[in-house]
């Protein structure tokens, strides 16, 4: 087994209550945290509104909510059959009246068969979490100091995943110049 401890933090120039409202939309139809426009084939989806007991995940990564503090903290536990044993969580900490810190912590052990995929999975995970942090900052402040740069290999893999999902009918066809002509 491989043990992974991975932490992402972002200080945001906004009150913790405002960023907490953004955090609480995760997995909803009005999700303001997850970069659904980038990770089109992997939106966060739950079987019920965000709260303890909600089951879901993104793509093939499955987890359930095991702790939830409205506007402050969400803890997820990975489904045992997915090759990951452990948790990941989002937490908000006030740093003053108009500043807070958003943290994501991943603490898992991977199954033996998943070990060769760890570098690939961590790269993907890092990009997904950082784009979520981008969204939280942009939603709360209206600006972004620097947009997360997604590595070229991951952009290619993401594009392939989206194309397969569309080909399998799991996503609607891409909107573009040709689709507008066909609709006219």
Image (cartoon, rainbow, N blue to C red):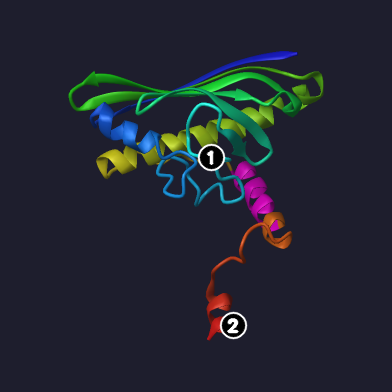
Q: Nearer the viewer, residue 63 or 159?
A: 63
Q: Residue at x 63, y 47 (%)?
A: 158
Q: Secondary structure at mark 1?
A: loop
Q: Residue furthest toward the bottom?
A: 184
Q: Position of residue 91 (x, y in %)?
A: 41, 22
- Is 16 situated left or right of 68 in this image? left
As drawn, the label of residue 182 is: 2
Q: CA distance from mark 1 to mark 2?
A: 37 Å
Which residue does the numbered mark 1 point to in the structure image? 48
Quadrant for residue 32, please give it.
top left
Near mark 1 (Cα within 10 A), the count class, few <14, some 14-19 or many ≥20, is few
> Quadrant location of residue 4?
top right
Q: Residue at x 33, y 31 (%)?
A: 20
Among numbered discs 1 and 2, the one appearing first in the sequence: 1
Is residue 97 or residue 71 the one in the foreground?
71
Q: Which residue corresponds to the image point at 48% horizontal and 35% vertical from the top-left? A: 50
Task: Report the number of numbered marks.
Answer: 2
Magenta range? 152-163
Do callouts 1 and 2 mark residues in contact (Cβ within 8 Å)? no
Q: Is residue 36 visible?
A: yes
Residue 35 location (% of width, % of height)? 48, 45
Vertical placement of residue 24 versus 76, above or below: below
């Amino acid at each position: 087994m491989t043990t992974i401890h991975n932490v992402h933090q972002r200080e945001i120039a906004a009150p913790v209550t405002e960023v907490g409202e953004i955090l609480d939309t995760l997995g909803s139809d009005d999700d303001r945290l997850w970069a659904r426009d980038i990770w089109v084939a992997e939106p966060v989806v739950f079987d019920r509104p965000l709260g303890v007991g909600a089951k879901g995940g993104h793509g093939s990564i499955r987890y359930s909510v095991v702790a939830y503090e409205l506007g402050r903290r969400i803890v997820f536990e990975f489904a045992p059959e997915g090759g990951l044993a452990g948790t990941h969580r989002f937490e908000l900490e006030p740093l003053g009246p108009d500043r807070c810190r958003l943290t994501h912590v991943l603490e898992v052990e991977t199954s033996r068969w998943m070990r060769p995929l760890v570098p690939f999975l961590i790269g993907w995970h890092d990009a997904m979490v950082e784009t979520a942090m981008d969204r939280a900052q942009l939603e709360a402040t209206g600006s972004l100091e620097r947009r997360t740069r997604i590595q070229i290999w991951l952009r290619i893999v993401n594009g392939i995943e989206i194309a397969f999902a569309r080909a399998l009918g799991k996503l609607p066809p891409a909107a573009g110049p040709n689709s507008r002509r066909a609709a006219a």
